[in-house]
Amino acid sequence: MSYGTVVDTALSQIRTTEYPPNSNKVKYNTEYYGYEVSGPEYPWCITFLWWCFTHGGESSAFYGGNKTASSTQLMNYYIGQGRFVTSGYQIGDIVFYNFDGGSGADHAEIIVSVGNGTYVTVGGNTTPGDEGSQNNGGCVARKTRYASQFLGAGRPSYSSSGGGSAEPTALRTKIIQATSRVLAMRHLVPESVAIFNNKPVFEYTIRIINSMNYYIPNIALIDGKISWGDGESIEYNDPTVKLGPMHAYTPGTYKIKIYGILKSISFYRSENAYVASRQALISIDTKFPETMSDITNLSYCFNYCSSLTSIPSGLFDNCVAVTSFYCCFYNCSSLTSIPSGLFDNCTLVQNFASCFSGCEILTSIPSDLFDNCPLATTFLNCFYNCSSLTSIPSGLFDNCVAVTDFAECFGNCSSLTSIPSGLFDNCPLATSFLNCFYNCSSLTSIPSGLFDN
């Protein structure tokens, strides 16, 4: 069986969305029908699968090389071929669902990873999460499903040659490993609190210039305690993310220690009353704890923390479910360096837009920064206005095969003197390089064939 290229093709399409919303106007329908279509009569979960098999070199394994846009018709085809199973599901199987309770199937997805009782799938015309319509959600998404949800699965007759290896590619292996970490680490239960009681689970340092009321901008903490670093502490127990407690400080430097089950913490709030609190942060001293392993969004986490100078290696090691770092370090204008391997365990990330934008004194980027991020689709403004950056490491994006957007990625990097040859060679899906090197006034040359692929 040779499912390899079909699965890789499906993975590369994650986050593709119909536009306008609720229109079913999407590239898979356009290629399937031969012209643009829209309207409720054009659902596209099956045309998405047809597209993946076609572009994955396995068109004959999908409906015998013919076309159908019907979930029920495709399911009945595999039943008729004796290639329909109701247990023992495998990577490459097409699984069918009935979400609306009618007759037949109303949705289908392809299995890309098999866990212990769970199945990671990729499907078209669904939603990114568990909420919203699962069979008319408007985007391509990675899902974690259970066998109890399946009507069964069609097992395509993949070719033994010409369709790619049945063995997982290195990139797919990383996705499978990351999924295993997500399933193993998510949803740590309150009973685990005993292991946290005697030592802090997270520490960071603030510097107070003038006497002020300091707020933890956003926190969710269960059965916890916050030590303010000045001999005082407070008990705290609230599982919902909200404005944290306040403490009055006199000038000085203080290490804040958090005990308990920390589910979420971030340091940005836009209201003027909290500007001084985010600007007081000068260092993150420990990695985020395992109890943050189910958090999916770290957008704005350190946004406008303009006094933050350092973050630890392994900061996000336990954040295995994160899909977005949008504006995570935006305008952290005092940040001096990025630790190597910062995103090593964040294999599910899709969005790095504006992640380090405005980090004005960064001079270099670790060469392995995005090595384990094969699902990343956007680096829009990622290093915009990193005006002290002098070079880009060769191979920075080598494993980022799903990227579509590099617009303004290195814009206003006025100290950048060179671009490595082959920087985008492994990014064949990229469609936007708008202002990618805008105002890089120290560049003297551009490598030949930079955008050939």
Image (cartoon, grey):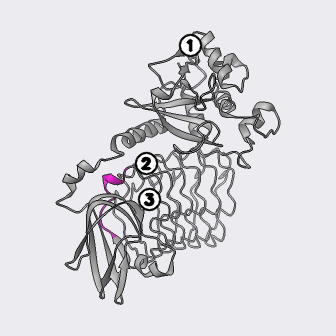
Disc 1 on helix, strand or loop? Answer: loop
Q: Is residue 13 above or below residue 112?
A: below
Q: What percent of the width, then of the height, locates residue 330? A: 51, 69
Residue 6 rendering spot, x and y as whole percentages = 59, 29
Q: Residues within 10 Å of mark 2 (few under 14, many from 20)?
A: many
Q: Residues within 10 Å of mark 1 (few under 14, many from 20)?
A: some
Q: Which residue is mark 3?
A: 366
Residue 291, numbered label? none
In this view, the residue farthest toward the right is: 35
Q: Position of residue 222 (x, y in %)?
A: 30, 58
Q: Residue at x 45, y 65 (%)?
A: 301
Q: Is residue 242 magenta?
A: no
Q: Which residues are magenta?
A: 284-293
Judging by the rendered image, the residue that carries numbered circle 2 is 321
Real-space Cα distance between discs 1 and 3?
48 Å
Type of residue at label 2? Ala
Amino acid at dot 1: Arg
Residue kind at label 3, given as amino acid type: Pro
Q: Is residue 125 left or right of residue 224?
A: right
Q: Which residue is mark 1?
A: 83
Distance of label 3 from label 2 (alpha carbons)? 22 Å
Q: Is 230 on the left-hand or right-hand side of 152?
A: left
Which residue is located at x 79 percent, y 31 percent?
33
Q: Is residue 62 visible?
A: no
Tell me the residue at 49%/74% (across/down): 304
**Nearer to the camera, 258 or 51:** 258
Residue that appears at 71% across and 45% down: 22
Secondary structure state at the residue bearing disc 2: loop
